[in-house]
Structure formats: structure tokens, C-alpha cells
Image: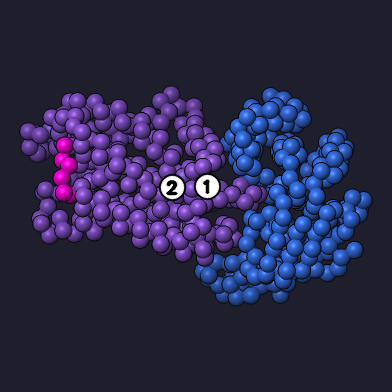
Chain colours: A blue, B purple
Amino acid sequence: MIILENVCLNYPISNKNLSIRKNIVSGIFGSNVKNDYIEALKEINLKFENGVYGLSGSNGSGKTSLLKLVAGIYPPSSGKIEVSGSISSMIDINFGFNPELTGVENIEFRLIVEGIKKHQRESMIEKIKHETELGEYLYLPIKTYSTGMRFRLAFFTSLYIESDILLLDEWIGVADQKLRDKVDKLIFERIAKSKVTLIASHNLERMQKICNKIVFFEKGEILKIT
Amino acid sequence: MNYLKEFFKCFSYPDIWIFYSHKNIILKYKDTILGPFWNVINSIFLISVLSLSYFLFLDPDNFKNFVYRLSISVFFWLFISASLNSFTSLLEDKKDLLNEKKVDVKNFVCENIYTNFLIFLHSIPIILILLFVSDFKFQLSLLFALLGLLMVLINLTLIGYFIMIMSAIYKDVKKIVENLVYAFFFATPIIWSESIVSENIQKILYFNPFYHFIVLFRDPLMNNFNERFYVSFFICLLLIVTIFFINLRINKRLENKTILYL
């Protein structure tokens, strides 16, 4: 279960040349901008119980910030967040990979970060290697990968990390049609294993198919919940 | 005392920083024939130039001992300075990972110290060879160099945490640290001996923490284990306590907000 009570998130802006920055940033973000920070989320009150939830909204509306708050990556500027259960996520566009390391090394590191013990890691790496279908590419630095290949690596690594809460951001956009079909099937199986799933996406039609509820965001505020 | 608990947690599950340290070294010296020994060769080059100057222009009576002293000092200084300098960009380098997964940043402190320490270990054979060549003897007091090393490692860990957090938030800290490290190279008796300066300057040296770091490691290795070691040990202990309390505050107020500044 995830509970957010009066949660606000402010991004600090550099104090240097504040007056110039203020003008530029306020031109882009409109009323979100205060003197030295941007209000990314304002007074958010939400409760996510078992189920699949969609987060919808335009760019900069606060979807990813909410996922990062739930994941514990960002601290709330004010308010309270309660998260019960383990978390697995696919949030950042770079998936936290080190571009200099090979695919296999990145899988291993991701499993280490998740706290998986060495004896379990070896068998998991073998399974993930097989599922990604990346073949010899797995032994090349991932800076040589296309975005789709990185997605494969990230997706199948996250898939094998069991957790109570699954956080996905724009999770399907970079996959090709063949991979989308495979991912669709697997994601439903994975969602079934997780107690709470939060998906942030622009694809409303897709979310309506799989989500129990969709939260709509605009300029860091909740617009409506359907 | 969450700060201390979190550090102990990093040590009880060291897989994260050990993995990255080993990979860092492999990547840094990838495709080179000599690997981390390049670091040693760079230092040997510096030591050779300084030793040659000493031989040509100054009294060559204690030449062997001078080279031995200089080698310990330079190798150890390079370990300290490389560690401190890399702390300034550590979180920026880990931005991608920190934006994807909540990872305790103290793991990166351990990673950085461990990586630089492994590189430093490559210079130990040179120090041992020079110990045999010099007039210094193997004595039980040599073991105090290990105690001194431990003291320096604890200090670097705490100072490193402070620099890492502050340089992520305040962008000037990187340049300040770089310049200070550069200045302290000349202000610390590394390429010169404290015996050649006046008593007043020697007194001022006591305010230089890097002087005490060098003393703690170098003096026992040079059969020079006396009250100066105890004084430096006490000062380093005091430094640990002071930085620890500063870090407690940083841990509580700034650490989890750091990601927002990257």
C-alpha cells in the first residue's frame, strides 16, 4: 500500500544569476516557478491499494516526480509518504545503467543494488540473458546499444526482481512491435505478481485497458481521478 | 545515529562498492598494457626527477634514505589527493543510477576510497624494495604504519562524505577542493623535510591535517616512531570526532536532498 498525505515536491534552482534564470524558467513553466525552486508537486493526497494505477498528464505535469517520490529517490519537501512493501522500478530513461559496462555486468550490478545474494544472482543472470535475446551484444558495453536494446535489458532485469510494488514510466514507448507483444504478455504476468503497480504514460488508450484507476495531473496538481 | 548505522550497513553488504571499484579500475586502464601500474610509473617518474635534482644540487650523503622517504610520501600523497579530488564529482557521475534507484550514497564513499586504495597498493612493492635498499631496518614499530593507515582511511572516509555532499549542492566546492589539494602538496612536507624549516613553521605544520596523515604512515616506516606519532594520532582522532559531528548534521539535513541538485 502507498499513502501520500499533503505531499509537496520543490526542485531547487541554482541561485546564480537568479533574475535571468527566473525569467527564462518562468517563461517555460509558468506559474510553477517561485524565487528559488519549482513546485513539481503540490498538496498531493493519494492512496494506492492493491491494483494497477495509471498516471497521466502532459510533460512536466508531475508523473515521474510522483514515481520518484514513491521509489524513495526524491524526498518530499513537505507532507508524508508511507510505502509498505519492496519496490522495483523502471523510471529513468537511462535505467541507471553504466554505459561503459557490458550488458551482463549491468544486469549483475542491478541485481546487487536490489540486494540479491551472490548464489541467487548467478542463476538469475542466466535466465535474464536468455530472455533478453541480445546474444553476443550482452558482452559489449551498453553504450553500443540502441534505445530498444537498453529497454530489453532493463525490462527483463526488472521483470525478474520480485517486489510488492512495481513502478513503470513510459515503459513501452521505445520497444518495437515484436517486443511490444512479448512485453505486453509478460507485463500482465508481472503486474499480477505485484500488489501495487503504478504506470506513468501518455498513452491513455493503453492505460485504460490495464489500469483500475487513472490519476490525471496538471502542473503538479491532481486534476481528476477516473 | 542513523549516519553510523547506514555506514555499517554499507560494510555489512559491500557488494555494491566492491563491484564498482573493481570495474572502475578495469575500465580506467582498459586497453593499456600496464594497467594500474601506470599510476606507479607516473609516481616513479616524479620521484626520479626530484631525486636527480637532490643528487645534483644538494648533499648526496643521505641519498638512499632521501629517495625512500620521498617515495613513501609521494605515493601516499597521491592516494590522499586522488581520493579527495574524485569525491568532488562522485555524485554527478552516479546521477543516472541515483535517478533510477534509491541507493545509499555512502556506498560511493566506500567505493572511491577502496578504488584509490587498490591503486595505492600497487606501489607497495616499490616501497618495500626501497626499504631493503635504504638504511632503515625491519622493526616491530613498522606495524604502527598500519594503525596510522587505518586512521587516515577513517579520516578520508569522513572528509570524503562531506566533500561529496557539499560539492553536489555547491558547485564551487569542486574548484576549492582542487586548489586546496594542490596548495597542500607544497605546504606539507612531502618533497621537503620539516627539519629544514624554522621552528615557527614547524609549529604551523601542526595545523595542517595532511601533515599528520603523512606522519602517521611515514614515520613508523622510517624507524621514527616517537611522541610525534602519538601527537598526530591524537590530532587525527580529534579530527574524526569533529567531522563526524558535522557529517551527522549533513546526513540529517542535506543527504537525501542532494539528488535534487544533480
User: Which chain is mark 2 on?
Assistant: B
Q: Residue at x 26, y 39 (%)?
A: B145
**Residues packed near mark 1 inside 10 Å, few (<14), some (14 to 19) or many (20 plus):** some
What percent of the width, then of the height, locates residue A108?
A: 63, 34
Along the line of sight, the residue nearer the viewer: B233 or A111: B233
The residue that disc 2 covers is B86
Image mark for residue B9: 1
Q: Residue at x 41, y 31 (%)?
A: B36
Q: Which residues are magenta?
A: B223-228
Query: Which corner quadrant holds the C terminus of chain B?
Result: bottom right
Label 2 SS: helix
Q: Eyeballing the image, is A185 above or below A2?
A: above
Which amino acid does the dot numbered 2 rest on? Answer: Ser
What percent of the width, then of the height, locates residue A146?
A: 71, 37
Along the line of sight, the residue nearer the viewer: A31 or B132: B132
Give the main secondary structure, helix, strand or loop, of the magenta stretch: loop
What percent of the width, then of the height, locates residue B125?
A: 30, 27
